[in-house]
Image (tube, grey):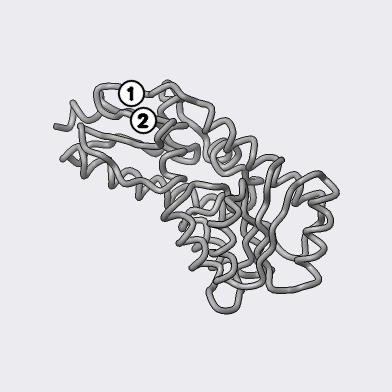
Amino acid sequence: MTKILIVEDEAGLRQGLEINLRHENYDTATAADGEEAIRLYHAEQPDLVLLDLMLPKKSGFEVLDHIRKVSKVPVILLTARGQETDKVRGLRSGADDYVTKPFGVQELFARIDAVMRRSDVVTQAKAVCEDQLIRLDPSTREAHAANQKLKLSPKEFDLLMYLFKNKERVVPRDELLSRVWNYRVDLNLNSRTVDTHVTRLRRKLQKAVGTDAAVIVAVAKIGYRYLGQASAMVHS
């Protein structure tokens, strides 16, 4: 049975989420503050975390940072309406998705199902992807470029993997949002999220390769394409 850790300081919402999730046959654990969330995360080893950002004792950001240091478990943020800056910060810190309060239960269930499916696909994909430039091992979530280990966030790894697997074509931004982030194509927040992650990923690859070669290129008004070794050879 899938176990979900609910981290929410508002008692009514926390209890409502627990009741609805249990009705859908999820196992649950609940925490009302950040310190309890970290303790229960290690004690319960949940399969997914629903994480409110505004928490007493330790903030949701601190909880997320702690989880990402030890695990790649899926995390869905529970955010207040209008907190765009917080959403961006949470996504950059490794959250898998967010739901804006107030939200419908069916929307939340759909987000949970989608995030869990994506997590299962990543976990089950055992084949190593490699060319003369990079090596990606899905089973260990390790990435190497030019024989150097890359320090990638979970989203950066997934993004590079998806671009690598589709390197014969330009991947549109909305496809990356759908397949890597599982987002609705939702205005500027999502587009900036893709661009920010690609920029950071490109810098890490270029640093490892030791050149300004365009390992990942942008195609105006469309998206991105992984060029890999061919580009690095031309520019080296």
Question: Where does the image place residue 211, in percent across and percent down from the top left?
Answer: 17, 39
- Dot label at residue 226: none
Q: Is residue 16 left or right of residue 144?
A: right
Q: Residue at x 54, y 64 (%)?
A: 38
**Res. 161 image quadrant:** top left
Mark 2 is surrounded, within 10 Å at the Cα level, by few (under 14), some (14 to 19) or many (20 or more) other residues, namely: many
Q: CA distance from mark 2 to mark 1?
A: 6 Å
Vertical side of 234 occupied by 55: above or below: below
Depth order, front residue of 30/101: 30
Looking at the image, which residue is at 38% across and 30% down? 137
Residue 130: image tag: 1
Image quarter where the C terminus lies is top left
Q: What amino acid type is highlighted by mark number 2?
A: Leu
In the image, is 130 to the left or to the right of 234? right
Please state the horizontal and vertical placement of residue 117, each as a whole percent of the image. 64, 35
Image spot of residue 195 (x, y percent): 44, 49
Count of number-bearing discs:
2
Residue at the (57%, 42%) spot, across then down: 177
Can you tell which quarter of the image residue 11 is in? Answer: bottom right
- From this viewpoint, which residue is outermost toward the bottom? 57
| Image height of 78 relative to 184, above or below | below
Neighbours of disc 1 within 10 Å: few (<14), some (14-19), many (20+): some
| Disc ID at residue 136 | 2
